[in-house]
Amino acid sequence: MSFSVKILKYSLLKYSVSKTELKKISRNLLKLALPSMVENSLQMLFGMVDTAFLGHLSWQAMSGAGLANQLIFVFQVVIVAASVGVNVIVSNATGVNNRRKASRSLWNGVLLCLLWSAVLAILAPFSRNFLKIFGHVDETVLQHAVTYLKTILLGMSSMSLMAVLGAALRGSGDTKTPMFATGLANLLNIFLDYAMIFGKFGFPRMEVFGAAFATVVSRFVGVLVLFVAVSKNPYLSERIRKAIKPSLEDLRDIIYVGLPAAGENFMFSCGLLVFASILLVSGPMAYAGHRIGINIESLSFMPGWGISVAVTTLAGQYNGRRELEKVSTVARQGFLLAALIQVSAGAFIFLFPEIMIRLFTNQVEIVEIAKIPVRLVGLFQIFLALESSMNGVLRATGNTTFSMIVSAIAMWAVRLPLAYLFSVKLKLGLLGAWMGMMSDMSFRSVMKLLFYMSGAWERTAQKVSSSVRRVEGSDLS
């Protein structure tokens, strides 16, 4: 089939199913997406609540936690591999009612995460050494970063278990339980953050340590809720005693899909470390403004992430049944839904940036600095919407290697060189750095769209669907 014909086949402007089927897909997508949107909003609140409370404590505390989070993103590499791999395998296995494969994938993902969490706990005492990667860091900011990073690393098992258990439940089609678990954990985190940071309700004043410790404790509560849900899930509790045993075959399938996604996350996160170093040249105030911009960007991306999760789940189930026309329809409807929501949100962010910024700080100078990145976030929402739908369908079909390559090129050949040129050489400061960042975002989304439209994703999609059919005991009728 020629490239031009495939572009016509996989255009986001057309659909190739009946109107009745289109309505069904749209309804199911929205049903999965709404809880995922809420869950993502609540997930982002974990970091944002810390940022908001610490921002009102001092800008140094907020910046220290921000630096620590940059490294935490790097350390999540194995967690990302496990959660993405489990999500994709479970969704495809659910599509063909292969309960044994879904259960085994989940518990092998859990094992992988627990082993990695143990490694990170051992590395926690060396947090200061890791943070030396940043240059031009204020000593007070560095002290806060060390405290936050060490505490989170010691409790990383809470984050990893929430990630993989939630991924499995979403893959099975249950997006409501992860939403509920994350909501409960967030309510507890908000209370504990306020109590532990400022010393309220009988708690001692623990400041930055209190913010990190509250996050760890709250996530463990979420883990308990998810464990209960998994034990009752018909797709994930199948033969639990056998499924919980280590399996090289299942680990291989998880890693096949999840490792490129982890590589993408790792290279992107390493790039963010360099990006942060470029920003620190502009001064600590500029970095504080950048952190606020990043949090608002994350806030604006919440609908897109939720839709991306829904696209991965639904497209994965259709891919398991090898119904590629329905996979492409899910991608189309996911983009239209994301674009509608995010462009509307972008207009509000662009027109009223100060409303968002003052959630994180009341310091006048930082408010003015942060308006630059926040307005840019509002302008580029259409690209965020496009990437969310493309990420969803590419992950559902196992095409994580292409995403990794594109993200690496976008970060290291687009964002960082342009950010350095505009910010340092042309002395545009924070504006220049974010011009590089927006160029990266546009490049990534367009390249993933072109790959999807070419139809080159079909071969890997078939490999993934085959992997969930080869386990004895599946019901393929």
Image (tube, helix red, strand yellow):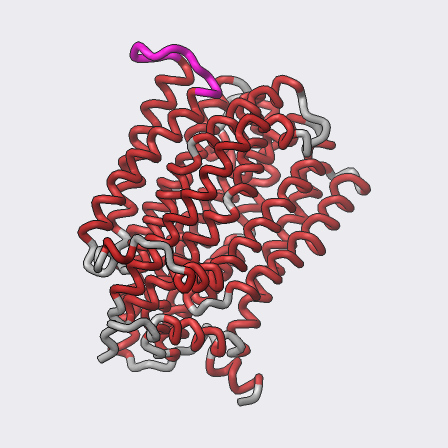
Q: Residue at x 23, y 75 (%)?
A: 475
Marks counted in the figure total 0
Judge whether residue 208 is colored magenta. yes
Give percent across and percent down for residue 401. 55, 64
Give percent across and percent down for residue 124. 53, 29
Query: Toward the viewer: 314 or 240?
Result: 240
Judge whether residue 99 is colored magenta. no
Up the image or down, 165 lies above or below 92; here it is above
Q: Residue at x 56, y 21 (%)?
A: 144
State the predominant SS element of the stretch in magenta. loop
Give percent across and percent down for residue 108. 37, 54
Q: Residue furthest right?
A: 425
Q: Residue furthest bottom?
A: 1
Q: Residue at x 67, y 37 (%)?
A: 430
Give percent across and percent down for residue 460. 48, 74
Up the image or down, 109 lies above or below 248; here it is above
Quadrant of image for the C terminus? bottom left
Residue 23 visible to an observer of this rendering: no
Up the image or down, 2 lies above or below 413; here it is below
Query: Toward the viewer: 388 or 271?
Result: 271
Compared across the picture, whether 287 is left or right of 161 comes to: right
Q: Residue at x 65, y 37 (%)?
A: 276
Query: Toward the viewer: 203 or 296?
Result: 203
Give, as a single range, the part of the protein colored magenta: 199-209
Residue 451 visible to an observer of this rendering: yes
Rendering quarter of residue 183: top left
